[in-house]
Image (cartoon, grey):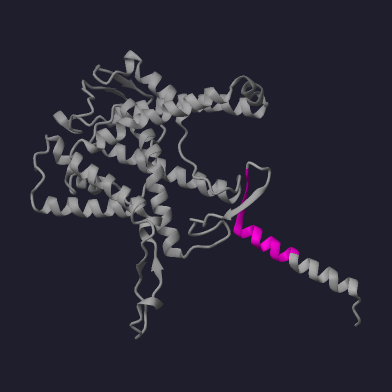
Amino acid sequence: MRHSAGNYKELAMSSVATDDTNKKDEFDFVATGNGESKGVPAPASTLKYKVKDVPPIPVTLMSALQHILLSISGCLTTSAVVADVACVPDDHPVRSQLFCTTLFMVGVCTLMQTAIGVRLPIFQGPSSSFLVPLLALQRDPTWNCSNIYDVNNDNSEFQANVTMATNVSTMAGGIDPLPGIKWRLQQMGGALMAASFVEVILGGFGLLGFILRFIGPITVACTISLIGVSLYRLPIIYGRPNFIVALCCLLLVLTFVLYLNKVKLPLPKCGKGKNLKGRPRFAIFQLIPILLAVVIMWIASWILTLCNVFTDDRNSTAYKARADAKLDIIYSSNWLQLTYPDFN
């Protein structure tokens, strides 16, 4: 095949254009004061895995567990508010059942949305919009935990003088408050179902789009800010037994994220070779800093518990800092159970 001089010229120009394109990928062009553009080196990507990359299975599992720990505050807040409105004591198994039910439904909704729903890698957590009617119910005088209440249903009549304070023992006085708790949970479930039905109507008839015309970004920003501010009670409540342990966990997270994020630890490798350069390295401080900090501080709390550093007085707030403070709830919980509550 014969090529003319024009063809060679076109090939040369295309190769130059390709080289210019590659150079543009390596540089970011910024405008100068003289109306010209100046190339500066593009910043290096800090992503360990890109969108189309498939991480190894151990990294995926540990990252998923850390993501759950990051998102667990919303699940814990919702289940804690429900338990407080239902006047559930701190040491009652219903609290763990509500929390486990919340995590179970969050997992089911996340799988459905990522598989057959919007198909986006989004964690489906509990909606904070349901907290408003729950808090409204809590202010009702008939739902006051310090009052004596009667619970009536179709099968039997439960009447008990129970002071449902959140700091009393579950079986104080030999009375189990489960019937009263179940009654309140059923009432809350019915109220939230009615509220959800209203949302279905608004979304089905397209009324929500009309309403959003009058709701600007300022309203949404204030609402989201108030929801975030409302979570300040959680670190105070759960860090109160021992603020030293809580602060140490916080310092570990900050150290891993800010100072050790580029450190890669070598992983074990099968074989007879002793060359460390051939071992795979894992950026553990960058990928799972929160999970690693929680595991380290739990081991430290377990050691301090074995050394009797923490008090063994169950009536003391510092007792909850022990690693075995909630073992009775673990023993009393079922290995497998259906969602709670059941409806009569």
- The answer, for residue 338, to whether it is visible in the render is no
Q: Say if the magenta span includes residue 29.
A: yes
Which residue corresponds to the image point at 63% horizontal and 21% vertical from the top-left? Answer: 211
Q: Which residues are magenta?
A: 17-32
Q: Where does the image place residue 144, in percent across and percent down from the top left?
A: 29, 18
108 inside magenta stretch: no
**Would you place residue 226 above or below residue 294 in this image?**
above
Residue 322: x and y, percent?
A: 16, 46
- From the viewer's perspective, is residue 40 above or below residue 85? below
Q: Measured from the top left, where is residue 25 in percent x and y?
A: 63, 58
Location of the C terminus by quadrant is top left
Q: Viewer-proximal residue, 113 or 53?
A: 53
**Residue 223 visible to an observer of this rendering:** yes
Q: Measuring 53% from the left and 63% from the top, which residue is drawn there?
A: 54
Look at the magenta stretch and give its main secondary structure: helix
69 vs 172, left or right, is right
| Location of residue 86 by image quarter | top left
Residue 26 drawn at (x, y percent): 60, 59
Q: Residue at x 35, y 71 (%)?
A: 267
Q: Residue 185's image quarter?
A: top left
The foreground one among 99 and 264 is: 264
Q: Residue at x 41, y 72 (%)?
A: 280
**Along the line of sight, the residue nearer the viewer: 28 or 120:** 28
Q: Residue furthest top?
A: 141
Would you place residue 299 above or below residue 108 in this image? below
Quadrant the N terminus occupies = bottom right
Is 241 positioned to the left or the right of 14 in the image?
A: left
